[in-house]
Structure formats: structure tokens, C-alpha cells
Amino acid sequence: MDGSISKRYLPGVQCTTVYRAIVSAVLVVMCVITSIAARPYDRITFHRIPAFARKYRTSCTTCHTAAPKLNVLGEAFRLNGYQFPENDALLRNDDPVPLGADEWKELWPRAIWPGEIPGSAALALRVQSDVQVTRRAGQPTVSLRFPQEVYLLAGSTLGEDIGAFVEVEWTQEGGVEVLQAKFKFQNLLPWLPKRSLNAWVGLQNLYLFTFADRQIDRAGRQKFLWQQFRPSDLELRNPATNETLQSANTFRLPQTQAAVELNGLLTSRVFFGFGLAQGTRNTVDDNNRKDLYYKIRYKLGGLGLDGHYPDGGQPVLGGGGQLFDRTLIVEHFGYFGAQPVEGNRQDEHRSFGVNARGLVGPLDIGVGYVWGSNDNPWGAAAAAGMRYSSVFGKAEYLLFPWFMASFKFDTFGVDVPAARAIGFTEGTLDQTRVLPGVIILIRQNIRGVIEGEFYTEHAGSSARGERRPHNLWFRLDVAF
């Protein structure tokens, strides 16, 4: 890596890497062969990677381990409103367009405080294409999802202490949808310590956990089960009457939604956030109530959340431009909300989570637990509550700067004792699975993923007398 960023954060690391990798996966019964090869290359050019890399003229691995998975500097950059913790102005190679002279600052409030807009289009595209090999009741099926998802991404600073981010998604199933459109106002009160109070406003990812979050820490393809769960996914049946129960509550805990969040750093090691959220993806609130949430994170050792090392601290440097760390991160969140259900009832719900994650050089390992309850997901149909819980974890290891081995596991269970008592005894979402995989950086902005999904328990399939729905996924993920 060349340039001022590498000299400031990664001294001694060169961005010149020569490699050739051929990875093949052969499925005997499924007859699928995938080969991914990377040609040797010399000095990387930075003209075809996303918006922030264009703005700062730097490598993807300055902020990412395997994009979108952030390294410790990338997380500090995100928390700082898309500005590097130090020397942000000196690091820029893409000069912004000023909206007023600096002298206007001295005239405020008798003049408008000057701002800026990006000097070039702050846009990027991300295209994800998948191959799914799954085992159904009859024979294996192969599905080509080309593409599966396309993202339009825009991000930039709008002057000092203001950042903006927009994410628009197209999927095969859902069409076009705006996932995020948010603004970050950093350092709200200038007499407080820097970065101790910020406001993030808009349609946004709440980042209740950074551990395994889709934009911060997920290297593989598959989400954890608790990240996909909606109360409406559970259908119960009374075998005596053949009646069914299914909730109208489609709330999913990690979904993006309109929110106002206040957050900041209590110290360089402690991050907090609390917010008011819409509780739904709709632009109009469907029950005129707002959800509340909080989150807290503690980081022991390594690079601080403010982007600074303690006295005597220094980066843990890996080969080929990767930035490592030695740290323990602990996170906790709470979420309290309500959703309208049948009979003009409100389904009050709450969720809590905790995790611990360790980074030791090329090893990233962690485990977490999420618990939640719903008071009345079926409304007037049944006076019954629901409880769910999940244990999940992962281990990732960078065998080479461009090759990561991954292993994830999770369990998920739902308990509805009151509904069982009144005869709804059939129907469950209890599952246990393991997800081994590999992630290959064909280029820094071109990622290949091979990930298996193998169930040791899938109660729904067992109840129907079906085989467990194992899957094998191949993904090509390109950002430019």
C-alpha cells in the first residue's frame, strides 16, 4: 500500500502482492464444479472500487478485511461519520466543492456556516450473483440467481462532522427498495469532549450488534437464524380441528427502519447508543407508537473505537496490506416495541442480546446469545405469548491475505406453551445448523464465497416427514 494512509496506519506494509489461487469445489451427486482463479498483478489501481476508496485514493483493505467486513480502522471510520480519525483533510485526494468560504465561519450566526459536496460522484455499485444447490424431497436442484441482488450505494461527508449514506437494493423477489437514507451529525455540542454526542437520523440500520452484522462483520453469505426470524414465520395447527394460527406480525429485529439515534463515545473504549424507531418499514407509522432501543459496546485492547492506539500501542500488521488487531469486544442491546395484529390488538415485544468477540491477529472468533418475547402475536385469535432464543457463533481465519476460512453455527428455538395448551400442538421453528465456508478475494473488490448450510436439527421438516433442507451456496460479489 502506498500513500499517506498506509504511512499513517500501516507503516512498512506494501500493497504489491503476487498470487495465483485456483479453488475448485466438486459435488459428486450434484455435478457442480466451481473454479475461481486470480491472476498475478502488481501495483493496485484504485479507479474501479467504491465511493470512499475513490475519495481517499486508497485500498479496500485500508478499512476492510473482506468487504463488506470491516477491520478495526474501518469501524472507527464508520463511527466517525465517514471521516478518518486523524488527518482526514490531508488524506483526501478527491477535493470537495466548497459551499462558501472558510471566513464565513467567523461571521456565524450572521452568515451560513460553509459546507461542501463531493468533488466527484459519490456512487458505487455492488452486484451479488448466487448459485444455490439444495436437496429437496426428490432430487438435488441447482438454481442460478444471476444477479440475486444489486445495490446502489452513495456515501460522503458534507463538510466537517456531517456524513450521508444511501443504499438502494434490487432483488429478484422484492424489486427495488430503499434500505437506507441517513445522515450523521457528529459532535453535536462543541463544549463536550470530541465524539461524545452524535445524532444519526433517517432510514437506517440500527446496528444493534456489529458482530455478524450484514454491513460490518459478515464475511459469508448466510445470516444467523435470529436475524431472519419474524413471528409470522411460525404457523401452528390444531390436529383435532385442523385450525391454524399465524401471526400478522412481520417485524424482523435487524431490519432497517426510520429512526433517530443519539450515540457517542464515553471513553475511547466504550460506545453507547439509544434511539427512537418507527417499528416498521412503512413511512407512515401503523400504530402511532415508537419503539425504543439501546446498545453498548466495550473494547479491550488494540485500536480504540476513536481510532487511536494507547501509548505504546501499534498496529498488528498482516501480509498483503491486511490490518489486524488484538482485542476483546463485548456488546449488549435491548429493543422494546409493539406491532398491530388481528382484532385491533398490539403485540408488545422485547429482545435482548449479548456477545463476546476476540480478534487475535488473523483469527476472529465470537459467540452470542439473543432472547426475545412477544406478548400476543396472534391478537384476538388466541391469548398466547411467544418466546424465542438463539445461541450463535463463528470463527474466521485468514490463511492468506486473500483467503479466509469460515465456520459458523447457530441454534434457534421458539416456545409457545399457552398455544400448545389449547390444542395447537403442531408447528415449530426449532433448528440447529453449521455453516462452513471459504471467502476468496479475487481482487480487493471482487469476492467469491462458497458456503455450506447443514442442519443437524430442522423440526419443521421432521414433522412433515421430509429430509432436512441442506444447501450449498456459491456467491460472486463485485463492487465498483
Image (tube, rainbow, N blue to C red):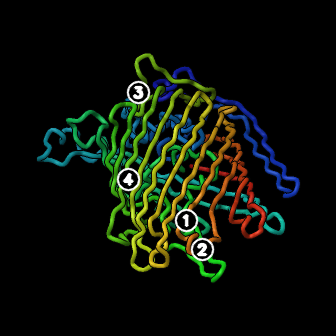
Going from N to C along the chain, the mark reached first, 1 or 2, is 1
Question: Which residue is tagged 2?
Answer: 424
Alpha carbons under labels 1 and 2: distance apart: 9 Å
Pointer 3 and pointer 1: residues touching (CB < 8 Å)? Answer: no
Q: Indicate the position of residue 290 as horizontal and vertical percent values.
A: 34, 63
Q: How many labels sit on residues? A: 4
Alpha carbons under labels 3 and 4: distance apart: 28 Å
Furthest residue toward bottom: 241
Pair 2/3: label in front: 2
Q: Indicate the position of residue 90 as horizontal and vertical percent values.
A: 38, 31
Disc 1 marks a residue whose amino acid type is Val
Secondary structure beneath dot 1 equals loop
For the N terminus, the quadrant is top right
The foreground one among 280 and 461 is: 461
Name the residue located 69 percent from the left edge and 48 percent from the top edge. 435
Question: Which residue is tagged 3?
Answer: 308
Q: Could you tell whether 58 is left or right of 440 in the image?
A: left
Pointer 4 and pointer 2: residues touching (CB < 8 Å)? Answer: no
**Quick check: 452 above or below 192?**
below
Pointer 1 and pointer 2: residues touching (CB < 8 Å)? Answer: yes
Quick one: label 4, few (<14), some, or many (20+) residues within 10 Å?
Answer: many
Question: Which residue is tagged 1?
Answer: 416
Disc 4 marks a residue whose amino acid type is Tyr
Question: Which residue is tagged 4?
Answer: 293
The foreground one among 25 and 407 is: 407
